[in-house]
Amino acid sequence: MPMTGRRADPAGAGTSLLSGSLARHKIQLQAIRSALTGRDWTLERGPDGRLSHAMLVTAGSGHLVGTDPLFGFSGPALVWVPPGSAERLHMKAGATGWLLAIADDLLASTMSGNAESIALSAIAGRLLAVPLASAGALADLAHSFAAIERELSAAARGSWTAVTAHVALVMVGLWRASGIEAVAGRSGGPASSILQRFRHLVELHYRDHWRIPRYAGALAVSTDRLHAICLRELARSPLTLVHERLVREAMLLLERSMLTVEQISAHLGFKDPAHFNRFFKTNAGVPPGAFRRETARSAAHRSLVQTHHSYADWP
């Protein structure tokens, strides 16, 4: 379990256990109630080492163990811990808030398909403790954490959609409060700005199959300059970046949705399913049907393994 408190009053910490499809997607939230003593939680990495943790600290203070130097924080604050960034969380006596563990596949589904996904992905890779100076920001985040807790407890119809929406709101709140994008915009220079705008355009139009000259025209730069910027900053061509985005979305749909390969092909803007099959195999190494079957087998195996462990052993 990624959030096992020690020395905690049993009545002071409420854990939302997962069930059904929510458990398979590996997300769990625990409310941190005020206690007379300090408490510790182990931040597990999950079977694939890819669990992130978000902590909304509504009051009190604490620190992360396993960082150098020691990473401390005081509420109200939103703390984000990427996979493997810390080993344990210590909350001092009287601290309150929530602790949320999120798997990579959930993060990917919340951040895809919108113009902000590049910025959100960049935020998700940083260890952050962001003070919440605005009472409105704190209230909005507290609402989302409480809503996630309710949905995980109920596991009702539409719970996955609701949880995904509130995780997205948490990520947007982290992005807004951090101010990182404003700093990057001031320090990155013209090339950084062009690259950021290009990736935003890709998020908006990758399904439209824009050609690279059209992207360059929308950015008011030459195709050669866009190519040079992408190679210098990311070591990939503009076309490679567009293809990577298409493949990532195709993989998510193949793994998560009930759409047929033909329907996914049409959704991603391919006029011919055979063209989609060739495109996917070229970029992913296997045809889409084979990818879906292999993903289903892997998910079934993980589910079988998990049934032999109690919730105390989660994930």
Image (cartoon, rainbow, N blue to C red):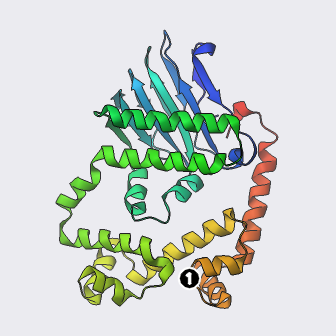
Q: Amino acid at mark 1?
A: Gly
Residue 223, by quadrant, is bottom left
Please say if 213 is above or below 149: below
Counting labels gives 1
Quadrant showing the N terminus: top right
Please say if 13 is above or below 170: above
Q: Nearer the viewer, residue 220 or 186?
A: 220
Residue 246's spot in the image, x, y percent?
Answer: 53, 76
Residue 110's spot in the image, x, y percent?
Answer: 52, 55
Residue 80's spot in the image, x, y percent?
Answer: 42, 41
Neighbourhood count class around disc 1 (C-alpha, 10 Å): few under 14, some 14–19, many 20 upward: some
Residue 112's spot in the image, x, y percent?
Answer: 50, 63
Q: Nearer the viewer, residue 262 or 185?
A: 262
Residue at horizontal 71 percent and vertical 42 percent from the top: 156
* Dot 1: element: loop
Task: Kindly tell me whether residue 195 is visible in this rendering.
Answer: yes
Please say if 308 is above or below 208: above
Q: Is residue 70 rendered to the left or right of residue 255?
A: left
Residue 155, by quadrant, is top right
Quadrant showing the C terminus: top right
Q: Nearer the viewer, residue 150 or 196?
A: 150
Q: Residue under circle 1?
A: 269
Q: Nearer the viewer, residue 126 or 167?
A: 167
Please say if 253 is above or below 42: below
Q: Is residue 156 rendered to the left or right of residue 190?
A: right
Task: Kindly tell me whether residue 49 is visible in this rendering.
Answer: no
Residue 308, by quadrant, is top right
Residue at horizontal 73 percent and vertical 49 percent from the top: 21
